Image (spheres, grey):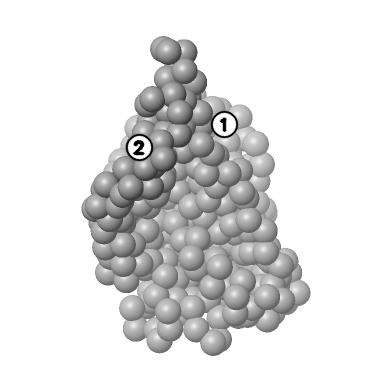
Amino acid sequence: MTYNEFMIESLTKQLHQGETLLHPIVARQETLDGLENVFLGFTENFLLILRFSGKTIVSSERRPLDIKSVKITKQFMGGEYKINICFSQDSPLVFYAALKPLAYKMQKKNLPEFIQFLEEKSSNKNGNDLKSIDGIKIRRQYFNTILIALLMMIPTVYLFIAVSQLISDGKISADFWTDTAIITPVIAAMALPFVILSFLNRYVFGKLVAVINEKGIYLENYFLSWNKIEQIHYIPHGRSRSSEMRKLYTRAVFTVKNDFGKDFDIKVNFFPLYAYFKIKKWHPEIKSKLDKTDIVIFALVPIVAILVFVIEMFVKR
């Protein structure tokens, strides 16, 4: 059985009497833990979702087509389409679908038809225009890796120079503070690009991921009213969409209650840490949780580096 045949057969088994399978495709669904392979298809009134591994169906779901808004964007890398669906009474769904995946020849024909059918079921085909919404613009932080490296490097360099001067003669020099005054220009030279990049990172570069104002948080295809947010869980690092590359990114998971009383989680990738602290400051009544493991590790790096340096110097003596 080919993969095309496996997809059609698996989706057909989910049909109820009188239903017809429309526009089946293969995609990847974004979840809180990463990405899952899925088969998608429509009936006249439902979206069918089959999660699979290899040629084994893991789980299935039927979503009524009560769609509030849809946002389709073509990704710059990989040529995938990001399909962001906001439902009236249920949690939003995000899928990534390629036009020409291996082993699924019908995808080239079916994916445009799938997107067209989906957009016809929604009155809003563009989601939220974040650029035109008044409020604080929250951007993806492109320079975070460089900034973190600089942040760790500045105290590390200072401590290296200071410790080396302290123990170069096997004793603390009486003129230590005079000697270490030469470090100041070095620190200033390293701090300047940190300040400049921090400004550019927050206010100039980076794709908009959210807008925050007095009403709530606007995402690209969803609006989180302040009184509907029950908790925000911030994870400084997570796995990228491409599990093969294992890149790191920040993310926030909002637990919200919709107008119909349903609780669900919404994950916002590349949500910056400073925005998390702004939310905590402005709305302390919202429960918050910050994963601190990676932060502690970063803080310990300069200390460990100095300890290793000191030990090596004493061993050489």
Quarter of the image for residue 118 reads: bottom left
Q: Is residue 61 visible?
A: yes
**Residue named by callout 1:** 53
Q: Secondary structure at mark 1?
A: strand
Query: As shown in the figure, which amino acid type bears the numbered disc 2?
Result: Ile
Residue farthest along the front direction in this orientation: 174
**Residue named by callout 2:** 161
Q: Is residue 46 visible?
A: no
Say whether residue 232 is left or right of residue 149.
right
Q: Name the residue at 62% across, 35% down.
A: 57
On the rendered image, what quadrant is the C terminus found in? top left
Front-most of 74 and 272? 272
Q: Which mark is residue 210?
A: none
Q: Name the residue at 38% across, 25% down.
A: 169
Q: Name the residue at 55% across, 86% down.
A: 215
Front-most of 299 and 115? 299
Dot 1 alpha-carbon crowd within 10 angstroms: few under 14, some 14 to 19, many 20 or more: few
Quarter of the image for residue 158 reads: top left
Q: Position of residue 100 (x, y in %)?
A: 30, 41
Say whether residue 220 is left or right of residue 77.
right
Work out how far the residue at label 2 is from the one at label 1, CA to CA, in angstroms.
54 Å
Q: Name the residue at 59% across, 57% down.
A: 234
Q: Nearer the viewer, mark 2 or mark 1?
A: 2
Dot 2 alpha-carbon crowd within 10 angstroms: few under 14, some 14 to 19, many 20 or more: some
Tag 1 or tag 2, which sits nearer the N-term?
1
